[in-house]
């Protein structure tokens, strides 16, 4: 039996997501093969693809933190599960596929009457929100909280769960997501306001009891100014890295499993030592799941019961087929997504979302390994769209570090117009040299000889 899955062969942008077809995996002893019905798309998937998430697998790997599907085959020694049963899990990677094999103890039974696309949101977004509210912030009825990114997947989950808890809710969002925040019982605040935290202090009459921050870096520390004495900032992400802001902003393109750990430790210690008792509490769903698996399953069971009783209504921003995983990452990276994006492996119907027109105008960036620079500084050379970012020190075009080997794409033999690369190189001119290299042509999508002519770079 054949199946499809998405593979990341090297760390980088959305163009690194490749759909392949291969034999479906066979379950080993103690494993269960699941036919995936819905796979969640989340910011940790984007960060792992860039190589900057602490849980980034080694390439090649298949992304996907969570899934919901039906049991397809059982390995030896598996008990308590039956073929056709609806189940879900959070394997951290591997969910962008039609079939997946996981250990039987990782699976959680799901009621058959639940929508798979809605249920998959519980395994990452809602359990993150639930555990942060109950185990990190220790929120009590009557308290107030501030949610950054309130219209996103975790943000909408915090709004719904906070409303059930009897909390006063404030949420930062764009103008597009303001109505969603209002509908879920929160007070929207434009995230672009320069006096954002002063506005929170004014609305909450002196500060909130907890702030939930997915951005990390300096933003995480600044969130303390919106707290009243004794309040907590619950930090659960470092998405500012994707915009190259803050202390946790390394060069992307390589695996960095310790990303963000020193910064979280620094700010956590600072919150303990400084007056005001305004603490920074880091949250990691993967570590809480590993260290306290029984707590994870108990919280997930509580959420499934709330969903079954229709006390929760996960917002599905888009339902896309597996072949549009790249578009899903582009939508998420662009920002402004209301709710959660879900991939539907094996779906033969069109996507249930209207593509953003701005994305259709985005130039396709294809990468090919340069034929020069075979040492430790070898990187990819982008010949279409924006220049690729190097993962090593050296040329900002992503070319080898030694200037005498820099080649700049000029004009393809098929007549493609010359593309000038505007980069900052005020003290150095690229070595003038002609040659040919095999590159992926942006129009044909195949190996194509590209002529590299003389061209110097002008400073931006």
Image (cartoon, grey):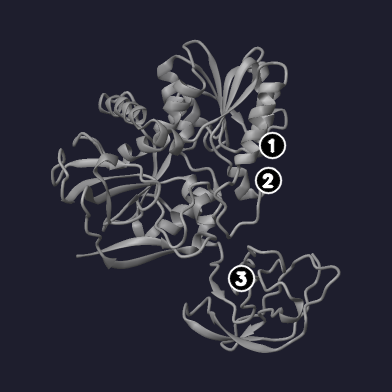
What label does residue 245 carry, if any? 2
* Label 2 vs 1, first from the N-terminus: 1
Q: Viewed as shown, does residue 460 lie left or right of 449?
A: right
Q: Position of residue 251 (x, y in %)?
A: 65, 56
Q: Secondary structure at mark 1?
A: helix
Which image quarter: residue 111?
Answer: top left
Depth check, front residue: 29 or 92: 29
Which image quarter: residue 22?
Answer: bottom left
Question: What residue is shown at x 30% (from left), y 63% (from top)?
Answer: 4
Quadrant assignment for the C terminus: bottom right
Q: Secondary structure at mark 3?
A: loop
Q: Are marks 2 and 1 in contact (CB under 8 Å)?
A: yes
Q: Position of residue 258 (x, y in %)?
A: 57, 46
Q: Which residue is mark 1?
A: 218
| 1 or 3: mark nearer the eye | 3
Q: Position of residue 14 (x, y in %)?
A: 50, 59
Relative to 198, residue 106 above or below = below
């Amino acid at each position: 039996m054949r199946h499809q899955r998405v593979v990341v062969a090297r760390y980088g942008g959305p163009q690194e997501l490749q759909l392949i077809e291969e034999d479906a995996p066979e379950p080993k002893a103690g494993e269960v093969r699941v036919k995936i019905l819905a796979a969640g798309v989340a910011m940790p998937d984007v960060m792992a693809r860039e190589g900057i998430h602490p849980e980034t697998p080694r390439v090649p790997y298949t992304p996907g933190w969570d899934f919901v599907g039906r049991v397809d085959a059982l390995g030896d020694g598996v008990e308590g599960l039956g073929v056709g049963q609806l189940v879900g899990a959070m394997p951290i990677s591997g969910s962008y596929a039609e079939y997946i094999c996981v250990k039987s103890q990782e699976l959680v039974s799901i009621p058959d009457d639940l929508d798979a696309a809605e249920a998959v949101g519980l395994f990452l977004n809602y359990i993150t929100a639930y555990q942060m509210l109950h185990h990190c912030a220790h929120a009590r009825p009557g308290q107030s909280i501030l949610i950054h990114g309130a219209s996103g997947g975790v943000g909408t989950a915090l709004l719904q769960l906070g409303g059930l808890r009897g909390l006063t809710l404030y949420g930062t969002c764009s103008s597009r997501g303001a109505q969603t925040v209002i509908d879920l019982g929160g007070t929207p605040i434009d995230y672009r306001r320069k006096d954002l935290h002063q506005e929170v202090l004014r609305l909450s009459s002196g500060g909130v009891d907890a702030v939930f921050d997915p951005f990390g870096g300096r933003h995480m520390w600044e969130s303390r100014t919106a707290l009243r004495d004794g309040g907590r900032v619950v930090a659960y992400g470092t998405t500012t890295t994707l915009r190259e802001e803050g202390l946790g902003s390394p060069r992307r393109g390589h695996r960095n499993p310790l990303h963000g750990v020193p910064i979280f430790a620094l700010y956590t210690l600072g919150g303990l030592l400084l007056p005001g008792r305004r603490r920074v509490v880091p949250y990691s769903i993967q570590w809480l799941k590993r260290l306290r698996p029984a707590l994870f399953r108990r919280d997930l069971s509580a959420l499934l019961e709330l969903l079954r009783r229709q006390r929760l209504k996960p917002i599905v921003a888009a339902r896309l087929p597996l072949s549009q995983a790249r578009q899903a990452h582009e939508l998420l990276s662009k920002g402004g997504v209301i709710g959660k994006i879900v991939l539907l492996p094996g779906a033969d119907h069109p996507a249930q979302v209207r593509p953003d027109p701005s994305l259709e105008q985005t130039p396709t960036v294809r990468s090919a390994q340069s034929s020069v620079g075979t040492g430790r500084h070898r990187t990819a050379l982008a010949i279409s769209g924006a220049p690729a970012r190097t993962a090593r020190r050296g040329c900002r075009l992503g070319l080898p570090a030694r200037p005498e080997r820099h080649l700049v794409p000029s004009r393809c033999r098929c007549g493609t117009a010359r593309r000038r690369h505007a980069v900052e190189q005020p003290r150095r001119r690229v070595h003038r040299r002609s040659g040919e290299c095999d590159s992926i042509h942006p129009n044909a999508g195949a190996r194509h000889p590209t002529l590299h002519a003389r061209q110097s770079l002008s400073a931006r």
